[in-house]
Image: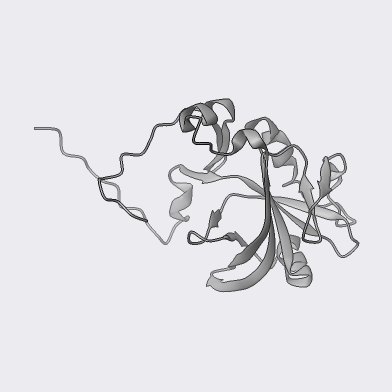
Amino acid sequence: MSEKTEWVMLNLEDDPIWERAFFVHPLVLVGTTEENGRPDFAPKHMATPVGFGNWFAFVCTPRHNTYQNIRRTRCFTVSYPPPEQVVLSALAASPRDACCEKPDLAGLPTRRASCVDGELVDNCPLYLECELDRFVDGFDDYVLIIGKIVAAQAMPGVLRDADRDDEDLIERHPLLAYLAPGRFASIAHSQGFPFPKGFRK
């Protein structure tokens, strides 16, 4: 018989449980437009599809320019950086200076979005362009921002193809994952999930 495990009960009155263990998230760069017309990018890891349709959501706070920009412009972009752009992605989290600018973003390579008023971070394998659908309040000081995807672009090499094995695709184009809190990983190895017979979405 195996030794009995002594489970640790986490005190929910202390720090949030998300600081006590590691959790796997995507890492994306949400792009918005400042009042002066300049692009702004912010890394987000609390980001996810909503349902199986073309909806995307992420968590933000009204204290951040990202939230205020989206409230004003009603749109945002999403760039999925590859692992080799992790330092660039981290720079997007730089604090603002006395002029409320992010000087570290000055050298960030960008290009215009195709459908919404915004910019994309260049050389990313996947992009989404979203129009604001709604804000969902009620998560302490944070808000869920939901957008309708109105355009999407991808590098051909990252698209699934019936003639190519999914495992090979991920090995050739690794994915960047954020391991909250404060670590990252490059995912290059994967296995097919063992869905039971007859499984449906």
- Asked if residue 117 can be seen in this view, the reply is yes
For residue 2, which quarter of the picture? top left
Tell which residue pokes out farthest to the left in this image.
Answer: 1
| Vertical position of residue 112 compared to residue 131: above or below | above
Position of residue 103 measured from the top left corner of the image (x, y, whole percent): 86, 45
Q: Residue at x 57, y 40 (%)?
A: 182
Position of residue 173 measured from the top left corner of the image (x, y, whole percent): 59, 30
Q: Residue at x 38, y 35 (%)?
A: 192
For residue 141, which quarter of the picture? bottom right
For residue 191, which quarter of the picture? top left
Position of residue 85 measured from the top left corner of the image (x, y, whole percent): 70, 34
- Report whether 14 appears left or right of 44: left
Of residue 49 and residue 8, the one placed in the foreground of this image is 49
Q: Residue at x 57, y 72 (%)?
A: 136
| Vertical position of residue 174 compared to residue 5: above or below | above
- Asked if residue 80 can be seen in this view, the reply is no
Of residue 11 and residue 131, the one placed in the foreground of this image is 131
- Report whether 122 appears left or right of 43: right
Position of residue 105 measured from the top left corner of the image (x, y, whole percent): 83, 44
Q: Quadrant of the C terminus?
A: bottom left
| Vertical position of residue 16 compared to residue 23: above or below | below
